Amino acid sequence: MDTWIGLMSGTSMDGIDAVLVSFQGKTVRIHDSHSAPYPENLRQRLVIASQNQATPDEVGELDTLTGTLFADTAETLIRKSGIERSSVRAIGSHGQTLRHQPSGLGRFSLQVGNPSIIAEKTGVTTVGDFRSRDMAAGGQGAPLVPAFHQHFFGSETEDRCILNLGGIANITWIPSNQNSPVTGFDTGPANALMDAWCFDQTGRAYDKDGQWAEEGIVDQALLSDMLSDGYFERQPPKSTGKEKFNLEWVKTQVLRHDGIRPEDVQRTLLQLSVITAARQMPQTPAMTVYVCGGGTRNRLLMKELSQTLSPVRALNTDTLGIDPQWVEPTAFAWLARQTMERKPGNLAEVTGALGPRILGAIYPA
């Protein structure tokens, strides 16, 4: 039986999630998993680089450092699982996004985490650079997980919306009617702004369980200003990242409002994540929302989301058989399999590409 490894580090830039999986039809089996946090110094360097404040030398060094950490994470997972290395067909590595610019003349998506280093250190064929081909075909290069969501989470009896709460939130709309198209796009910030503000104001990397936000109240004037950002009204296909939704974006908004307590800003940012995701979802009577990503661990975020979506149910993806933390790395293991089997990995109706494309570059063992 072939197994596959998926490596994922999202816009939260908190570390690397790794899974060892196998696929049988529409069933996923997660054999083992492992998470490796970024050393704080490396995390800070990645954040600075993502803000266009790094030289080419620094970007190159980060490519090597993160590639080594991705390789070490995969190596730890292989040893931990006890599986024969030869049974791992390939590693799918998303890398760490530094910059995602899906519009303009020089459209690109830049990830660091050199796949050559991963292949060399692990001795396992590695697939990386998943976004470039879709963008070359006129697409946004994101989101890429909807094809995985459709394959494994689709239902003939229930309209399903898969909501990923990473640094950025994205949705995949999977109608039960097989003749209706799957749609998907980034709705805006999920954890990125809350994490950035929390670190700036408290020195903590994130607000555990939303405890700090719970001490504040939603400032309606600030929330209204934030919601007026044109991204939220833009029609898909669309994708975004920390290039837009970052600490400077928050501070620019806050400057217009005097006397707001830091905890009120945090609470307002949480509400912004909830409202922008909920408003952009299709609404049908038979719909259920299934949530994945790091945001599922924020108790207050999940509580507010459930209340906002009611009477629509909001459940975690473990209801569908995959733990919320491991959905995205599993998706990139599957995308690696698609590449190795010369099958498309994108959904053109989601990304806006000219058509289905085989994604990724293969780095042989």
Image (cartoon, rainbow, N blue to C red):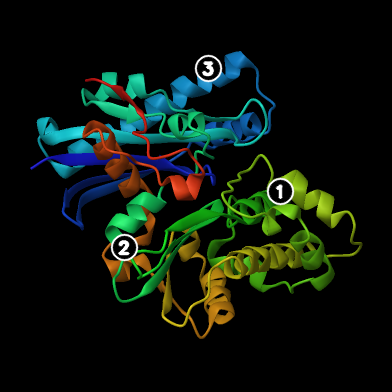
The amino acid type found where label 1 is placed reads Asp
- Residue at horizontal 74%, vertical 72%? 218
Whichever of callouts 1 and 2 sits on the residue coming sooner in the sequence is 2
**Along the line of sight, the residue nearer the viewer: 241 or 134:** 134
Percent of width and height locating residue 46: 57, 32
Q: Secondary structure at mark 1?
A: helix
Residue picked out by circle 3 = 60
Residue picked out by circle 1 = 200
Mark 2: few/some/many CA within 10 Å (<14, 14-19, 20+): many
The amino acid type found where label 3 is placed reads Gly
Whichever of callouts 1 and 3 sits on the residue coming sooner in the sequence is 3
Q: Quadrant of residue 320?
A: bottom left
Percent of width and height locating residue 206: 58, 55
Mark 3: few/some/many CA within 10 Å (<14, 14-19, 20+): some
Residue 153's tag is: 2
Q: Is residue 82 above or below residue 106?
A: below
**Along the line of sight, the residue nearer the viewer: 333 or 323:** 333
Q: Quadrant of the N terminus?
A: top left
Image position of 44 (left or right of 221): left
